Image (cartoon, rainbow, N blue to C red):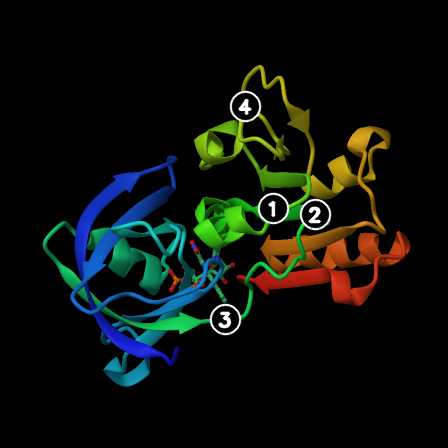
Amino acid sequence: MGVIEYSCNVTKHRMLTPTVFELAFETEQPFHFEAGQFISVVIPGAGPKGRDLRRAYSIASSPEMKPVELCVKLVEEGPGTHYLYRLKPGDTFKGYAPYGDFVYKTPAGRKVVFVATGTGLAPFRAMVLSERFKATAPGPITALLGVRTEDELLYCDTFEKRDGIRWIPAVSRPKGDWKGFRGRVTDFLRSEGSGIDWAGSDFYLCGNGEMITEMKALLAEKGVAKASIHQEKYY
Ligand SMILES: Cc1cc2nc3c(=O)[nH]c(=O)nc-3n(C[C@H](O)[C@H](O)[C@H](O)COP(=O)(O)OP(=O)(O)OC[C@H]3O[C@@H](n4cnc5c(N)ncnc54)[C@H](O)[C@@H]3O)c2cc1C
């Protein structure tokens, strides 16, 4: 399926955490994508000399769900995120989709480790909610989400208590009496208790570049084959 220009009608805007919002939209033409892919959103007039900018956002809902959902971290002085943040139900924006090859490729039964930081969880949410993923009979999955503070945890309801998924929220600097794992996702994976089958798993990494670099160094140390590593770097 080729890339199509979509006019996206906003249907919902709500805060998921103090700095991450969900933007839901519908399109007149059917919106085709595979779980894990992204939309390239046009940010009108925000570039040099008033040119348009583009920003990529992973689709956080599955291909079967309507409306389509994005989850966006509001970054300081970021033109893309501030444009999207100001949109209200009834507004429209322009986007091009689908893009990307960060889709689920693991054969049935093989173990999988999803590693995300922040909104990097979005493509994994799309995957686990998708019919195609459910039909693949995935092997046991470990899903890790790294955030700084516990109020930045996202989409816990999608991952916790889901059969076949071990959900590990890792909080590096908790503000309160956090009972879960304290540290970064890489700290968890390095810990004695991580129970990861390094050779028998596929690894999907999504989020900030620092985490991806650290993860790839760790996976190299553990002898994980490059073919078992898939990545989507946000910044
Ligand atoms: C394939 C792909 C998919 C992406 N999907 C998402 C997504 O689903 N949700 C999302 O929030 N972002 C996502 N991003 C990042 C997004 O494209 C923008 O870079 C981001 O929203 C910042 O845009 P901006 O114009 O507001 O700020 P910019 O001026 O472009 O960026 C300002 C700074 O913000 C920081 N930054 C960028 N993205 C993030 C982030 N997500 N969390 C924390 N800090 C960040 C970086 O340090 C960057 O230098 C994705 C990026 C790529 C390449």
Task: Report the front residue among 194 and 138.
Answer: 138
Secondary structure under tag 4 reads: loop
For badge 4, the amino acid type reads Lys
The residue under label 1 is 137
Q: What is the number of the mark on residue 31?
A: none
Q: Tell me: 20 left or right of 200.
A: left
Q: Quadrant location of residue 52?
A: bottom left
Ligand 1 closer than 8 Å to the CB at disc 2? no
Q: Quadrant location of residue 232?
A: bottom right
Residue pictured at 32% horizontal, 49% vertical = 65
Ligand 1 closer than 8 Å to the CB at disc 3? yes
Q: Gap between marks 4 and 2, in whole Å?
A: 38 Å
The residue under label 2 is 109
Position of residue 124 measured from the top left corner of the image (x, y, whole percent): 52, 49
The residue under label 3 is 100
For badge 1, the amino acid type reads Ala
